[in-house]
Image (tube, rainbow, N blue to C red):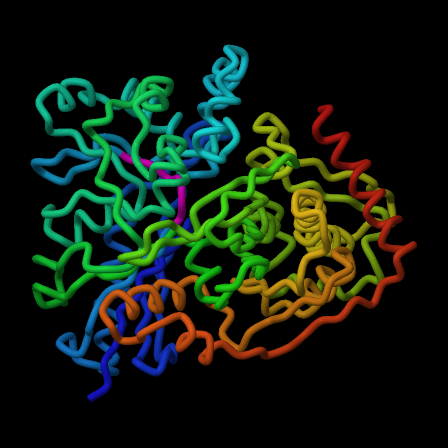
Amino acid sequence: MTRFILAIDQGTTGSTVALVDDHGILRDAVNFEYPQHYPKPGWVEHDPEDIWNSVLKGIRKLLSRKICKPTDIAAIGITNQRETSLLWRRDTGEAVHRAIVWQCRRTADRCDQLKASGAEALVKRKTGLVLDPYFSASKYGWLFDNARGARALERKGLLAAGTIDSFLLWRLSGGQVHATEISNASRTSLMNLKTARWDTELCDLFGVPMGILPQIVPSTGQMAQTKNVPGLPDGIPITGIAGDQQAALFGQACFRVGEAKCTFGTGSFILMNTGDKMLRSKSGLLTTVAWQQAGDEKPTYALEGGAFVCGAAVQWLRDELKILRAAGDIEALAASVEDHGGVEFVPALTGLGAPYWDPHARGTLTGLTRGSSRGHIARATLDAMALQNADILAAMERDLGKRMLPLRVDGGAAVNNLLMQTQANVLGRKIVRPVQTETTVIGAAYLAGLGVGMWSSTAEIRKIWQVEQEFRVRLSARRREQRLASWRRALRQTMQD
């Protein structure tokens, strides 16, 4: 009898629920989007009930297709948008405020104050992260100070905090388990990387009571069981969790030191496996936990750089500028012109991430002339998606002191051949696209499968991963430098503004 993993990929704009069989094949998947809330410029929120309902709708729709019976589900795996933070009541499970999304910049001033006090060195030394509103700690602090009734609930022992993995564990277990997986915990700025525990000094710094935080658990192993989940029997084990970018690294079978991937989603993120060594960046990158299998003494670490706006830039062209009917139209529109025609789009719509870390930067569109067209703007947008990653790769190579291996790519925009060729050209590196580009949800399934014993090792999983297409460099070094120089002039203008 075929066994299945039910994999939940709770993303920034929607939730995907998938079935992966015991051969590692993605058999089916459904996605449901949910609303984004922008109460003030630079602020981004999600309603936790919208998140939960999108997951339930996905489970219901997927199982209605009769690929398997609910009783054929051996385990559940979860991957999630990282850093997004919320507080909820332990007695009712009700959130006390909308979740603050990872993109949200509302705590930029608070982070600036902490930097001015000299706290950034402490944060980076203990967490491997820079002091930025991107991470969860300042979000928790804001919620604790501003959510109605939060302090009173904390005094009564009725307040729980968590990232989205923790919230889903709570809901899927019927409120029985308050835990968070280690790669998600490593993104909060509250976990000490060396001890893999919440750090009292960091909690005090950000004003977060340690008692509201969840237990930190490994990425594989039995974490909870389903209880009172519509459409699912009680007792299905939840055995694999990782933050979305770490899950993609796992789904890309980047199990060896030096192997790296780039995920093109709402943002774009490059992660490189550094094994059991914490590689400290001097170039604006992050040291983070990749995963930790149950029974392993130490986690596997990664070096990471991320751009906050990638696919979200295409959504902006579609939803706000109205120059696209559908996101998938951008490849043909961008290909309608020979090049960007001098137009530069720096998509700092929610600030700049690695390696610049400028939360106050805002998007700029420069180089426009009377001859600039929709096609030039579309081409400049695809170029920007690739050029942001070129900056991250250059920083990563400075930290490594050597050239990186070919880069594996995944995510929704990885199917865009023009973007992938542009990425190879501006990186000066070969790009490798796997057969399965939705590696985030696949990674969650692989972790859960390891956790429940469906697969015995990562070596067994590596045999499943296959290459679909390679993109080789087609741009001379001189033209690449010219393209990068134009981009960096636009970047400087963005940060000066």
Quarter of the figure with the N terminus: bottom left
Q: Residue at x 63, y 67 (%)?
A: 416
Q: Position of residue 300 (x, y in %)?
A: 43, 53
Q: Give the residue furthest to the right.
A: 478
Q: Give the residue furthest to the bottom.
A: 1
Q: Give the residue furthest to the top.
A: 117
Q: Nearer the viewer, residue 310 or 37?
A: 310
Q: Nearer the viewer, residue 16 or 392?
A: 392
Q: Nearer the viewer, residue 458 or 186?
A: 458
Side of 471 relative to 461 (left or right): right
Whether residue 163 is visible to the viewer of this picture, yes or no, is yes
Q: Nearer the viewer, residue 101 or 337?
A: 101
Side of 272 relative to 223 (left or right): right
Quarter of the figure with the C terminus: top right
Whether residue 384 is visible to the viewer of this picture, yes or no, is no
Side of 130 relative to 494 (left or right): left
Residue 35 located within the stretch drawn in magenta: no
Side of 422 relative to 37 (left or right): right
Q: Position of residue 173 (x, y in %)?
A: 13, 53
Residue range of the region highlighted in magenta in the rendering: 81-86
Q: Residue at x 48, y 38 (%)?
A: 103
Residue 69 vertical position relative to residue 180 in the rendered view, above or below: below
Q: Residue at x 52, y 22 (%)?
A: 121
Q: Position of residue 175 (x, y in %)?
A: 11, 46
Residue 82 located within the stretch drawn in magenta: yes
Classified by dominant secondary structure, the portion drawn in magenta counts as loop
